[in-house]
Image (spheres, rainbow, N blue to C red):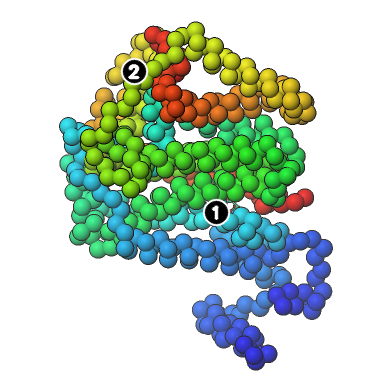
Amino acid sequence: MKDPNSEKKFKDSVNDIWRSVFRHGYTDTPRNRVLQIISNVWLHLHPARVREHGTKLRFTWCMGGITFFIFLVEVITGVLLMFYYTPDVNKAFADTIDLMYTVPFGRLMRNVHRWGAHAMVITVSVHMFRVFITGSYKPPRRFNWVMGVFLLVITFLLSFTGYLLPWDQLGYWAITVGMNMGGATPFLGHEGPFSQLLGITASNDIRFSLVGGTTIAAPALLRAYVWHCVAIPVIAVALMMVHFWRIRKDGGISGRL
Amino acid sequence: MENSWQNKESVEFEDDTVFTWPTLVVKEFLAAIFVMVGLLFYSFFVNAPLGELADPSQAENPAKAPWYFAGLQEQLVYFDPWFAGVVLPSIIVVGLILLPYLDNNPKGNGYITFKERKFAIPVFVSGYVFWYLLVYVGTVLRGPFWTFFWPWQEWTHDFPTPSPLINLSLPVGIAVLIGFYAAGFAIPLLLFKNFFRSLGVIRYALTMGLLLTMIGTAGKVFLRLVFDIKYIIVTPWINL
Ligand code: HEM
């Protein structure tokens, strides 16, 4: 880039393509930079201007943003998987095999969905670590940290409920382990301490309400499916709305005052 | 260079902000592309695990929780399920929720500092590391019957019989437990008076209660590994 005009030439040619699509040019003025953000329904999640350090990778590690992005990827791949998957103990496993071997791009979709879920658990916990290390949970952001903790739990539960859906040995026994722990809840689980006091048995305890039976069987699969594909994502979206709104209300990204 | 137009239009900003478009949006866009490419690339080459068809009569050995819960499952070695699977995670979640309300140190708000947060940082970081340590042991180092294997050891079914475990008698156990918490609450009170004064009674009680529970959890792991102690407290209703 020796030519002093090269930057201008480059911008002009980009502008030329832009104009072919949008029919008018983009002039780089402060007004237009603001309009790009505030007149775009998606981008106006952002303020028109942000503190410079908040845009630095070394400050946020971009971990909240990446977590959100992976969540969107999970929604899209998840919907595609739902086209082929039936939450029925006689079909679930075969549908998963079909996804892996016959459905076009099914294997890629399933792989992205599964690895994305793992990635999301990692990025959300790194995001929490970042927020802690930068002390960003301190006033006025205390409540947004609380929202974050709920999101953390929700992320775990999203992953966990999805684990049963292929109806394979891995998922089945993982959920069995998990649900047996639930059955050991003090007072509310039939194997938990003090549950006799409340007359709790295997068929009315907390585990029963989670899996819809005394063993992991068809009702458990259906419940996992509904929680995984409908209820928890809806809760997650609601919490994220609050989370993002609070970031703005709390004065944008944290930083030295 | 980026702000060259500012002079032209004589728009002066006194603060430290920049335009979101393009400074931030470009970075988000790039991050999204990198993540997407990385995810696609990985997914192209590595298949998501899939076991045999679920068979309720054929238990997996070892039956493992997904890795992010393997730390809790690992705690099953040291605690009964009601604690490892329910009470401990609940305490962790409650502790995380309370954290911003307990930490009333106004310093280090929005920037990284160790000097000004000599208590908060080590406590949180050790809890975080402890969690992932347990996750690692539970996921990688546990074989059939949840037996410990180093990464270079082969999983076998004939391992030496573990040494027998002992329980503390009830009075001793209660004394150990009460002594631990009493000493834990008292020592900082005597050594770091300012720490107590800046927190106040309620914050101090909650902070120390949570911290001591975390240390106690690690302590019980230690007691089990070194002294073969299974339970500190044994009662007909509940064991700890
Ligand atoms: C699904 C989970 C989550 C999503 C999608 C999410 C998303 C975000 C995003 C996009 C930001 C902007 C700054 C950044 O990218 O770092 C942010 C900030 C923040 N997040 Fe999260 N987050 C999640 C979970 C959490 C968790 C688990 C916590 C803490 C326990 C948390 C606490 C916060 C706080 C306090 C801020 C403000 C930080 C600041 O101003 O520096 N979030 N979050």
User: Marks 1/2: CA distance?
Assistant: 40 Å
The amino acid pointed to by label 2 is His
Residue density around tag 2, few if under 14, some if 14–19, many if 20 or more, within 10 Å: many
Near-viewer residue (A203 or B38): B38
Measured as percent of width and height from the top left, residue B146 is found at 31, 34
Screen quadrant of the N terminus of chain A: bottom right
The residue beneath circle 2 is: A190
Q: Is residue B219 above or below residue B16?
A: above
Chain label for disc 1: A
Measured as percent of width and height from the top left, residue A216 is found at 26, 31
The residue beneath circle 1 is: A63
- At 67% from the left and 76% from the top, the residue drawn is A28
Left or right: A149 with respect to A158? right
Q: Is residue B100 above or below residue B87?
A: below
The amino acid pointed to by label 1 is Met
Q: Is residue A157 visible?
A: no
- At 62% from the left and 44% from the top, the residue drawn is A132
Q: Establish whether ligand 1 lies closer than 8 Å to the Cβ of label 1.
A: yes
Left or right: B39 with respect to A47? left
